[in-house]
Amino acid sequence: MTLSRNVRNALFTGLGYFIALELMLIAAILFWPSFEENTAALKVLASPLPVLREMFTELEQKGVSAYVLSQHFFKGCNVLGCAAAALIAANAIAAEAQRGTLEIFLLRPLSRRRLLLERWLTGAIQVSVPVLLTTLTIPLFLSQVDESLALGPLMLCAVHQCLFLLSLFSVTFLFSTMGRAPLHLAFAVLVFIIFNFSIYMVKTVTHMSVFRLADMETFLEIYEKGALPLGVTAGILVLIGGCLWGSLSVFERRVP
Amino acid sequence: MPPTLKPNPSTKPPGITARGLRRTFGSICAVAGVDLDIEPGTVTGILGPNGSGKSTTLRMLNGLVRPDSGTASVAGVQLVGDGTAVRRVATFAPGEIALYGEMFGDEHLAWLLRGRPKAAFTKAQAIAEQLGLPPKKKVHAYSHGMKRQLLFAAAMGPDVPVRILDEPTEGLDPAKRQEVLEMIGGEARAGGLVLLSSHHLSEVQAVCQRMVFFHGGSVIADESPNDLNRRARRSATMVYESPGQASGVAAALQQQLGPDSKAVIASVTQDKNNVLVQIATDDPRPFLAELAAQSGPAPLSLELGKLSLVDLYRTVYGVTGL
């Protein structure tokens, strides 16, 4: 009964996030013919921002693949996904501490490791599955505008996107394990996200933005090569693993 | 991590043993080296003022707070790691009441009993029903006392040898309080061990076979209710109306009693308008005769054979500032 309530709550959150992503994806794909016609004009509009101008140049050269990858992953998943990851992770443990329920959460005969991994996995599934599911529907909607993309490389892009979101999720989760103010934590992470989006658009500091790891260029490379960037993937996996290990260590000793 | 079950080598069924339990929070020493030996088949009360280390000790015995040093075993299970193995053989009803208001009563009970056999839920449901808790009402609509009873039902449901209850009767009406105390007594008669904390000396005296007194993170006394009753029978509490003249009242009373009196002034305390004098005597009857025979200040009230928790701490254990 209890597990089903938790699963139900996670499903509702995940479903909302999935629907929002899917609607953004459908709108973007249906807009593709009009975008294609006006790419040159849009490039002129984007010219004051060198980073944006380069994106449009790439879009012009690569066509629908660059468009879909940037719309779905760089724009949709990065914006909604990062927000979802921050909010879900910030609430994971800190919300229990804030409402005072951490003591009853811990007093059952279940190990802290198990309780924490359950929370982490539930959140990770909520953050990742909608990205994977929406990506699966891309070929279907592209066929409506007489375009096509290979599903295999698209799914690799989705996997990379999930890893990127999970790294943000894991860092936030670690802080949630230590803290008792989920709103402050979520706000701080959202500020971090916005700041990184902002510097991404500034030519001189764009290389310092974390979104360089999940931008159109990265996804185009994955799509074209049909392989994940090993160095980046390994780095992200190490970060996720390190944060999870840190969370477990902190949670083992946490006072309710 | 699998539970580490280390059976106690003693032939007696194991109860609770703690040696040198210590815990600090920053610069505050909450528990400063507590030793406990509690036998099964008993109800043991832990008493003490706020901040005396009762709750932290109970939480440590349940694995919710890790001790900085010291060892403990509960029902023969060593307290190691995060205490999961201990929580399999002991239940805990916390003193802090924070529940998930969005859950229904029976749903919350099931949530609290996750990881226990199904029979635990059935028994807890029966206890909740006996206490009159509405199972299909959301917990946010429960009163403070009802929430306390829900935690109590969850702690009494599982078939475990040890139950640790932190202020289980706080916020309950007298009838419910009695019902809960009877259940606790029944648990000990059936061979279980109940360790409970309370601020109410009378209810602890009524149900406990032993009373452990805490102050400043340490155990300052360990007595049976009979010991305490004997102490109470040897005490008299008098209240004098005399603002700001505690020393004067004490001197006058000493004169009244005379040098040969066996009664001793144990303590004199001053509150806003009154002076409270605690007398210790083996037999209060000669003391009363001395008091009546001599002239001197007359007390506003005189109470024999009763000790409150505060009186006990002040007069018997010499604790000030309560």
Image (cartoon, rainbow, N blue to C red):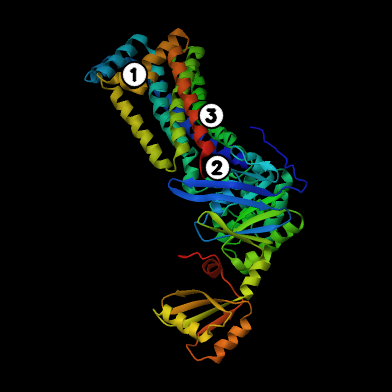
Q: Where is residue B176 in the image (x, y as percent from the top left)?
A: 64, 65
Residue at left offset 57%, top offset 47%: B21
Residue occupied by mark 2: B69
Q: Is residue A8 left or right of residue A192?
A: right
Q: Mark 1 lies on which chain?
A: A
Number of callouts: 3
* Residues marked 1 and 3, same chain: yes
Residue A35: mark in rendering = 1
Q: Which of B34 and B123 is in front in this view?
A: B34
* Residues marked 2 and 3, same chain: no
Residue occupied by mark 3: A125
Q: Which amino acid does label 2 sit on?
A: Ser
Q: Which of B167 and A223 is in front in this view?
A: B167
Q: Mark 3 lies on which chain?
A: A
* Residues marked 2 and 1, same chain: no
Do tag 2 and tag 1 residues touch (Cβ < 8 Å)? Answer: no
Q: Position of residue B4 (x, y in %)?
A: 67, 36
